[in-house]
Amino acid sequence: MNPYVGHPNPLKEGQELFRKGLLSEAVLALEAEVLKNPENSEGWRLLGIAHAENDDDQQAIAAMMRAHEAEPTNLEVLLSLGVSHTNELEQAAALKYLYGWLRHHPKYGTIAPPELSDSLYYADVARLFVEAARMSPEDADVHIVLGVLYNLSRQYDKAIESFQTALKLKPQDYSLWNKLGATQANSVQSADAILAYQRALDLKPNYVRAWANMGISYANQGMYEESVRYYVRALAMNPKADNAWQYLRISLRYAGRYPNRGDIF
């Protein structure tokens, strides 16, 4: 039974719980909101973000799709869908939503021909975002999308550079520090990744995904006892985080003889 069903303002409650970092509680409040107001794009969007930060990309995608249906041109929703599909290694879907972000952006829509959306190729989309970054080098969001695109093509050095540029513009963005850490980890720079994840956790201590990613980076360095501590912390905040359970079992049972999946945004 969801305790927030019947709450007079579950959206406001969900926003406050999210701000406090109580992600599992925020999910419940926001689920009550979209049950009450199924066409509320903001409720679905925030629910998607809460699921993503709680280390559940499938649920995040499902919520963001509902937000997208309610408000197809919402830039935050398009970017979030691009990121989640990148985490799921679904390149075609990621390109679709990242290109949609560019096409619907008031500043960059003119450089994104609508007909291109019928047959998207990575090189074409990446070229357009490089052009957008030249147009507005002070726009952190363009550098963030470029970083995500470079992750899609496994150009990790370029992705790291893009996220570092964005962080100079948005140094308090905890999710951006996590993206940098995930990219460094996927580029076999686990020690650097741990520093980036720690910055994310300094800014948002209950960030489940960053706790789980920290555990992965310790495990990738053979520091399994350390990794267990971080997985347990992530699971204490979200017992439904299936990835963290999987990684915890690996650290406890296989001591490095089982391959790790890459870190995620």
Image: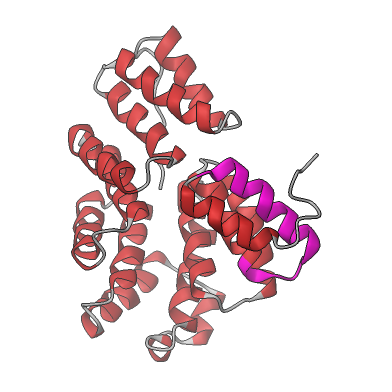
User: Which residue ends up furthest to the bottom in the rendered image?
Assistant: 110
Which residue is pictured at 19% across the width and 51% down the height?
157
Which residue is pictured at 37% across the width and 20% down the height?
229
- Judge from the rendering whether residue 47 lies leftward or rightward of residue 96; answer left or right: right
Which residue is pictured at 55% across the width and 75% down the height?
74
| Image spot of residue 179 (x, y percent) | 33, 50
Can I make out residue 237 in this image?
A: yes
What colour scheme does the image use?
secondary structure
Q: Is residue 74 above or below residue 32?
A: below
The region drawn magenta spans 22-42
Pick the front one: 244 or 23: 23
Q: Main secondary structure of the magenta part?
A: helix
| Image spot of residue 111 (x, y percent) | 38, 88
Give the position of the N terminus as an image quadrant.
top right
Is residue 214 a member of the stretch shown in magenta?
no
- Judge from the rendering whether residue 46 lies leftward or rightward of residue 153; answer left or right: right
Q: Is residue 3 above or below residue 151?
A: above
Q: How many marks?
A: 0
| Image spot of residue 143 (x, y percent) | 28, 67
Q: Which quadrant holds residue 211?
A: top left
Pick the front one: 225 or 221: 225
Q: Is residue 99 above or below residue 264?
A: below
| Image spot of residue 73 (x, y percent) | 57, 79
Pick the front one: 58 or 8: 8
Can I make out residue 262 in this image?
A: no
